[in-house]
Image (cartoon, rainbow, N blue to C red):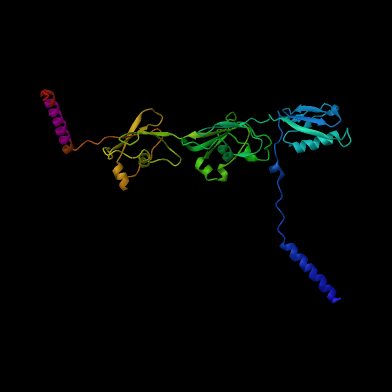
Amino acid sequence: MKLYISFLLAICFCCVAVASAQPPPPDVVDMAKAKGYQLGPGDEVSIKVVGEPDFDFAARINEDGKIDVPFEDQPMIAKCKTERELRADVKDMLSRYLRSPQFNLRVTERDSRPPATIYGEVAAPQQIKLMRKATLVELLALSGGVKEEAGGLIQVFRTQKPICAEADADADWKATTGDETDVPSRVYSLSAVKLGKEEANPIIYPGDIIVVQRAAPVYMTGEVLAGQGIYLKEGGTSLSEAIAKVGGVRPEAKTRNVKIYRLKPNSKDREILTANLDLIKKGQQKDVMLEPYDIVEVDRAKPGIGKTILEMAVGAGRQIVGTMSNSIGYRVLY
C-alpha cells in the first residue's frame, strides 16, 4: 500500500513539474484593435443568395449607419461592423426565411471615409485612402520623406471626428481655441518623429490633413563664399554656424563687424545688430542666434595704408606704360 501511494505521489510531482515547465499562455488578442475595415455611412454592400434570387439585394449605408433590407420591416445596423460581423448578422436574418442559406456578401463601394492628405515640405504630396489604421511615420514614408526645406514642426489637422473610434478618447480632438468652428490640430516635433518617439507618432484617421511646415530662411550676403539663403532648422542656427554653412568668409571680409538686419516685432522695419566673429571664434563673445528672415551682411575690410600705396603705385605704373606704348611709333626692318 505504501508503495502504491508513493507511486501516485511521484506521478503527481512529475505532472506538476511538466506543467510548470510549459511556457505561459499567449496574451489575449484584443479583437477591437485587430479589426479590419469597419463599415460606415456611404459604403455600399451587395448580398447574393445562392439559388434564391428573390433575396438578393444591394444597399448603401445611410447617415444613421443602417441599411434597408427589402424583405425586412426594420433596417439593419451596419456602421462600424466588419464584413465578417455583418455577414453573421445577414446569416441570422436569412435563416428566418431559408434553411442553411448560402450567400455571398461583398463591400462594393468604400466611400465612408475621405482620404488623408499630406503636403508641405515632403517629396511627394498626395492624398491617401486609408483602409486600415496608419501612423504619421507611415504616411511620411509613403510621401517620400521630408525635404531639406522642412522645418522642425509637423501640424496635423483633424477635419472630422473619426468614425468608429469612440473607444479611443484621444482620437476625438478638441480645438484649443475653444471655438467649436475651428479645426482642431496638434503639432509634433520633426526630431521627435525621427527618433521614433511614441508620443510623436499618432494614429492618422481619414480626413486628417498633415502639413510639414517649411523652415524659415535667413539670408547671407557680402564677403561670404556662397551668398544665399539658408533654412533655420529645429533647435536654431547661430551666426557662426550659418557662416560655416555658406563656406565661410573671403580673405578680405570684415569679420570684426558683421551686421545682422533683424525685423522689429510687428513691423517691416529692421534694427541693426553687430557681432565680432573673431571674438566669437575665440569664445570671448557669445554667439548670436539667428531669427527668421534675418539678413546677415559681411562687409569688405578696408585695406591698410601700405596696401593702398602699393595699389596706387601699381596702377600708376600701368598707366605710364600704357601711355608710352600708345605714343611711341614702330617700324618694320626687313
Q: Which residues are magenta?
A: 308-324
The reply, left or right, for residue 37 in relation to residue 141 is right
Q: Quadrant of the N terminus?
A: bottom right
Q: Position of residue 52 (x, y in %)?
A: 86, 29
Residue at the farthest bottom position: 2
Q: Position of residue 160 (x, y in %)?
A: 63, 31
Q: Quadrant of residue 83?
A: top right
Residue at the farthest front position: 334
Magenta span: chief secondary structure:
helix
Give the residue displayed 76% in from the left and 65% down from the top. 16
89 or 178, which is in the foreground? 89
The answer to whether 306 is drawn above or below residue 111 in the figure is below
The answer to whether 239 is drawn above or below residue 60 in the figure is below
Q: Position of residue 63 (x, y in %)?
A: 72, 28
Residue 201 seen in the current view? yes
Give the residue displayed 56% in from the left and 38% down from the top. 141
Q: Position of residue 307 (x, y in %)?
A: 18, 37
Give the residue displayed 80% in from the left and 36% down from the top. 89
Say if the magenta span includes residue 315.
yes
176 or 163, which is in the foreground? 163
Q: Quadrant of residue 180?
A: top right
Residue 68 seen in the current view? no
